[in-house]
Image (cartoon, rainbow, N blue to C red):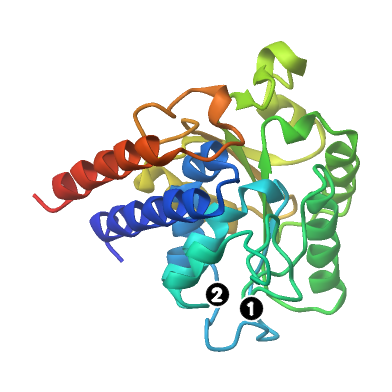
Amino acid sequence: MDRQELKKIAHEVRKGIITSIYSAKAGHPGGSLSAADLFVYLYFEEMHIDPKQPMMEGRDRFVLSKGHTAPGLYAALAHRGFFPIEDLETLRHTGSYLQGHPDMKCVPGVDMSTGSLGQGLSAAVGMALAAKLDQKDYRVYAMCGDGEIQEGQIWEAAMFAGHRKLDNLVVIVDHNKLQIDGKVEDVCSPYPIDKKFEAFNFHTITIDGHNFDEIAAAFQEARQTKGMPTAIIANTLKGKGISFMEDAAEWHGKAPKEEEFHVAMEDLKKAGEALCQ
């Protein structure tokens, strides 16, 4: 799939994020929007998956360790064909299978229920180890937030993955530099992120998480890396694509009101028109 097509899909994913969160009157737009391009590349290019067989044995696995950004994952899954796009508008509604955090028992395509920060990477490491023990060739991907990696369990999991040489594991850090309380560096600095992962025997790659050429090159490099897991530190913009949400910590976890929703959709409309020129 060419880069322009990926950009168009990412645009639709961002529309799905805003629409679902507005419909729910709750949710986490900032980190969902920052990770949208990464979700799209994973589900439309990188991972071996089949929406018609979401539990296919040989599929690649994905764990959204920062589970509160489920709206981004759901929008990617819907556009990939795992469930109807119109269901995105049922986010967090009573009786909906699209809960505030991913639920593997309810949502097709979700490999692990997540929400408690710091725990998802441990699950992903377990999946990667299982593949090695069972001599299977599927790969495992985990997405963490840059605020989430302040959690100690992240580094316990990283230590184990590096020690076991799990080269079928790729950790993606959505480095949008903001968390619910403000700037990551002010709350509890995890820097330098790449050097920390390297200390735990990871191969590290730092990229622009909105540039599909750099994203593609990073995942290709990760596939070629043997004997150690890979951490991709993706520099992103919180709230990417929505003028008043970009680089604003206040949009970590709240829904747009009606007027804000219309402004957001107008932003996306203009961006969509630009992609078609």
Mark 2 lies on residue: 48
Identify whether 127 is placed above or below 277. Answer: below
- To which quarter of the image does residue 179 belong? top right
* Residue 142 on image: x %, y %: 68, 53
User: Which secondary structure lies at badge 1?
Assistant: loop
Which residue is depicted at the point 67% across and 69% down?
A: 110
Compare residues 198 and 241 and report the one nearer the observer. Answer: 241
Where, quadrant-wise, is the N terminus in this rendering? bottom left
Q: How far apart are marks 2 and 1 (CA)?
A: 5 Å
Which residue is pictured at 15% across the width and 44% down the height?
274
Q: In which quarter of the image is residue 49?
A: bottom right
Q: Give the residue type at disc 1.
A: Arg
Which residue is at 68% across, 61% downward? 99
Q: As rendered, which of 17 and 256 lies closer to the eye?
A: 256
Give percent across and percent down for residue 213: 35, 47
Residue 133 makes an appearance in the image: yes
Asked whether the beta carbons under mark 2 and mark 1 sit within 8 Å of each other, the answer is yes
What residue is shown with label 1? 59
Q: Which amino acid does label 2 sit on?
A: His
